[in-house]
């Protein structure tokens, strides 16, 4: 049971480069999320999706784009990386849709460094 | 403007004693609260939750208390074990599909 899988696990970028983080879940969950974790800031929501083909902005969406072309995949893109985007990124999924538990299943994280 | 606050960045307790982790929130529309536990180099995992219509929820050694008038919740771990050493995140939900997290509290349980 893979659960939520993130690739890559580690990446170093130069300022201005672009990259995409891939999140895949095999639990048939409707909702998917991208969070970033920074020291002293906890987990902050970047973007989320409530279903295939839909996306929405979270707390800190600037500098990121997302796509949900397939239900099982949620991509996070950085078009022009900045040092402020150095962080650990977590993808999560949830089966909610009427279930009010709010429980999220997280991937192991992707550590991104922008030089 | 943080809607969910964990004002203690760290906590150290002796094995076997009680650990109390605190969380405050500002949004009175939050209707569900959760605690997540995170070990280094791993993603957070769900620990326990509570609906705003309750004031207590218990699961084994873990109990969450909710005080709506004070906009405060706490997680009690009794007895604390060394394996409980981790970062604990408080989270709250208004719409039931989007969670807002606190900054986390690092718990160290000393043998």
Image (cartoon, helix red, strand yellow):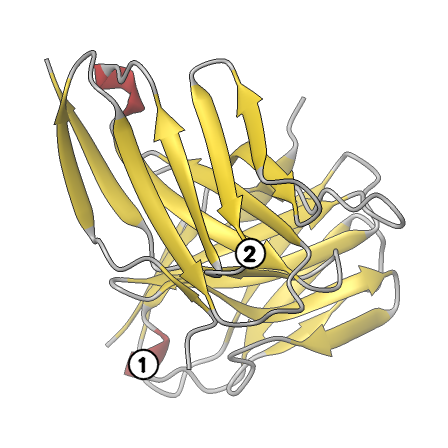
Q: Secondary structure at mark 2?
A: loop
Please name whichever residue, B46 or B54, is drawn nearer the observer in this view of the structure: B54
Q: Residue furthest front?
A: B69
Please state if B57 lies on the left or on the right of A82 as rendered: right
Q: Could you classify mark 2 by the number of other residues whose Cα lies within 10 Å: few (under 14), some (14-19), or many (20 or more)? A: some
Q: What residue do we see at 48% from left, 71% from top?
A: B3
Q: Quadrant of residue B5?
A: bottom left
Q: Secondary structure at mark 1?
A: helix
Please name whichever residue, A46 or A69, is drawn nearer the observer in this view of the structure: A46
Q: Could you classify mark 1 by the number of other residues whose Cα lies within 10 Å: few (under 14), some (14-19), or many (20 or more)? A: few
Q: What residue do we see at 54% from left, 19% from top?
A: B59
Q: What residue do we see at 20% from left, 17% from top?
A: B17
Task: Write down the residue under mark 1.
Answer: A84
Tell me the tag on residue A1: none
Query: Is residue B43 in view?
Result: no
Query: Is residue B53 in view?
Result: yes
Tell me the tag on residue B68: 2
Same subunit, labels 2 and 1: the answer reads: no
Please state if B60 lies on the left or on the right of A65 as rendered: left
Q: Nearer the viewer, mark 2 or mark 1?
A: 2
Q: Chain of mark 2?
A: B
Q: Tell me where residue A114 appears, x and y as whole percent.
A: 30, 74
Q: Chain of mark 1?
A: A
Whether pointer 2 and pointer 1 mark residues with C-beta atoms closer than 8 Å, the reply is no
Q: What residue do we see at 69% from left, 56% from top?
A: B31
Does residue A86 sit above or below B61 in this rendering?
below
Please state if A58 lies on the left or on the right of A68 as rendered: left
Q: Tell me where residue A17 appears, x and y as whole percent.
A: 42, 81
Quadrant, the C terminus of chain A: bottom left
Does residue B38 sit above or below A12 in this rendering?
above
Please name whichever residue, A98 or A93, is drawn nearer the observer in this view of the structure: A98
Q: Quadrant of residue B46?
A: top right
């Amino acid at each position: 049971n893979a659960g939520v899988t993130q690739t890559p696990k580690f990446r170093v970028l130069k300022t201005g480069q672009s990259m995409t983080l891939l999140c895949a879940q095999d639990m048939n969950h409707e909702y998917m999320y991208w969070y970033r974790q920074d020291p002293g800031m906890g987990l902050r929501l970047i973007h989320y999706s409530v279903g295939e083909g839909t996306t929405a902005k979270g707390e800190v969406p600037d500098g990121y784009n997302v796509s949900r072309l397939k239900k099982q995949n949620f991509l996070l893109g950085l078009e022009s990386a900045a040092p402020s985007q150095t962080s650990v990124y977590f993808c999560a999924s949830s089966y909610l849709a009427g279930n009010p538990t709010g429980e999220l299943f997280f991937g192991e994280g992707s550590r991104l460094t922008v030089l | 403007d943080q809607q969910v606050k964990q004002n203690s960045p760290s906590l150290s307790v002796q094995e076997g004693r009680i650990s109390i982790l605190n969380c405050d929130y500002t949004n009175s529309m939050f209707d569900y609260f959760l605690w997540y536990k995170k070990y280094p180099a791993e993603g957070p995992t769900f620990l326990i939750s509570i609906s705003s219509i309750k004031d207590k929820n218990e699961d084994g050694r873990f109990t969450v208390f909710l005080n709506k008038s004070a906009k405060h919740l706490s997680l009690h771990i009794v007895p604390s074990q060394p394996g409980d050493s981790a970062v604990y995140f408080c989270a709250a939900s208004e719409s039931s599909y989007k969670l807002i997290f606190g900054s986390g509290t690092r718990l160290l349980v000393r043998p």
